[in-house]
Image (spheres, rainbow, N blue to C red):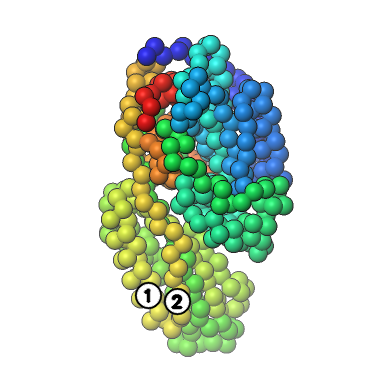
Amino acid sequence: MTLPDVKVDSLCLSRELEQLASFSDAAPPAVTRVLFTEPDRQARLFLKKLLAEAELSIREDAVGNLFARWPGTEPALPAVGTGSHTDAIPFSGRYDGTVGVLGGLEAIRALKGTGWQPRRSIELLMFTSEEPTRFGLGCLGSRLLSGSLDADKAAQLKDGDGLTLEQVRRQAGCGGSLGDVRLPQRYYSAFVELHIEQGPLLERMQIAIGAVTAIAAPAALRVQLEGEGGHAGAVLMPERKDALCAAAEIILAVEAVAKSGGSADTVATTGVCRVHPGAINSIPSQVTLEIDVRDIDLKKRDQVVKKLSDAIQDASRRGVRLQVELLNADPPAQAGREVLGAIQTACQRLRLSCQPMVSRAYHDSLFMARLCPTGMIFIPCKDGISHRPDEYSSPEAIANGVRVLALTLAQLAEGAAR
């Protein structure tokens, strides 16, 4: 096929990214935008306005996933999807996820501007709650879309205030049943997500585009430790059952097991440590840890989780009681061959350097891969920084990504019926 010559409006896209970042519970340059809070509501209204101006057909499902479709000349065929998320963890940056949503919209506008018409419909998707901030489970929207999360279980997820997802979504105006969120088979023929790398490799190698070949598999553990509290001055050291000291051993074991028991792609992090009662003159009686383990190799990831579980039990020798809960253990995803090929062809057409690479961060594409061939386009971000206020990707890097995305979507939209 002859690929259209697309022109990306970088200035407009930069303004839209800036305006989206203004919907936040944190002072600039930080962004905090948690699911179904007021900033999230404002961001959704802003995005719906842009989608309507682009003359796309808009629908929203029962958990707040937002779809915007450009109908193709053969609309009965499975569509080609693109998109990402707009929620943001506390005190993060303005590019994570948002580049894939607003950049996806700009890719569609750029294709429309050429006068080209897609054979398959092209659909932009903003996923609900890719971040685990409110309900402790990442990729909430895409898990439900792919059938990876039971709707009844999802409805009973609770936030820090004890409110269930069912209550919160209803308060936010999301009607319908969570059981209806799951997409039917062959809804999409392919899905491709544009995203900042969240790592330093592309910038370091001075490469414009990363073509993601695989997405690492995350597993999450919650460890609850219960010891005995007491006055910090009155309980002598031999008598102590300090829950935090036991937790400290576990935290160090997480690092040690990941370094020695996995592969070069194994990473493990203790990202949550809640201590009770949290007073300087009181021995910690209860601690909750939440641990993230991931690898692109499922077998090696699970071996690390097993070794870590054994190491956790060793901490019981300190006289504390342990409870370990596996929150989730998702399989890795491999990119669809046809999606990867389309990304590489687009880079060749645009004379942009392209590097095959794995994603050690997980994304909604991890779950979309259960529905259809999936791929990701990475663009460089400064110093590999992400989830911080100084997260940055240049207008030029973003524009390159949007151009590659547009040509990738065009190729996939012309693909043979599946």
How many numbered discs sit on the rendered protein? 2
Classify mark 1: helix, strand or loop.
helix
In the depicted structure, whether residue 331 falls above or below residue 198: below
Q: Residue at x 37, y 60 (%)?
A: 255
Give the mark nearer the N terminus: 2 vs 1.
1
Task: Left or right? Give the position of 16 relative to 326.
Answer: right
In the depicted structure, whether residue 42 falls above or below residue 289: above
Q: Residue at x 49, y 28 (%)?
A: 76
Task: Name the spot of residue 239 as percent of width and height, x first.
Answer: 47, 88
Classify mark 2: helix, strand or loop.
strand
Along the line of sight, the residue nearer the viewer: 62 or 311: 62
Q: Residue furthest front?
A: 76
Q: Residue at x 50, y 57 (%)?
A: 150
Specify the quadrant that holds the N terminus: top left
Q: Residue at x 53, y 83 (%)?
A: 228
Pointer 2 residue = 322
In the depicted structure, whether residue 351 falls above or below residue 319: above
Residue 392 visible (yes or no) = no
Query: CA separation, marks 2 and 1?
Result: 7 Å
Q: Quadrant of residue 12?
A: top right
In the depicted structure, whether residue 168 falls above or below residue 369: below
Task: Left or right? Give the position of 389 relative to 120.
Answer: right
Task: Name the spot of residue 185 as percent of width and height, x first.
Answer: 44, 41
Task: Name the spot of residue 16 as percent of width and height, x first.
Answer: 63, 27
Task: Name the spot of residue 319 as percent of width and height, x first.
Answer: 43, 84
Q: Quadrant of residue 43?
A: top right
Identify the mark at residue 32; answer none if there is no mark: none
Q: Are marks 2 and 1 in contact (CB under 8 Å)?
A: yes
Pointer 1 residue = 313
The amino acid beneath tag 2 is: Leu
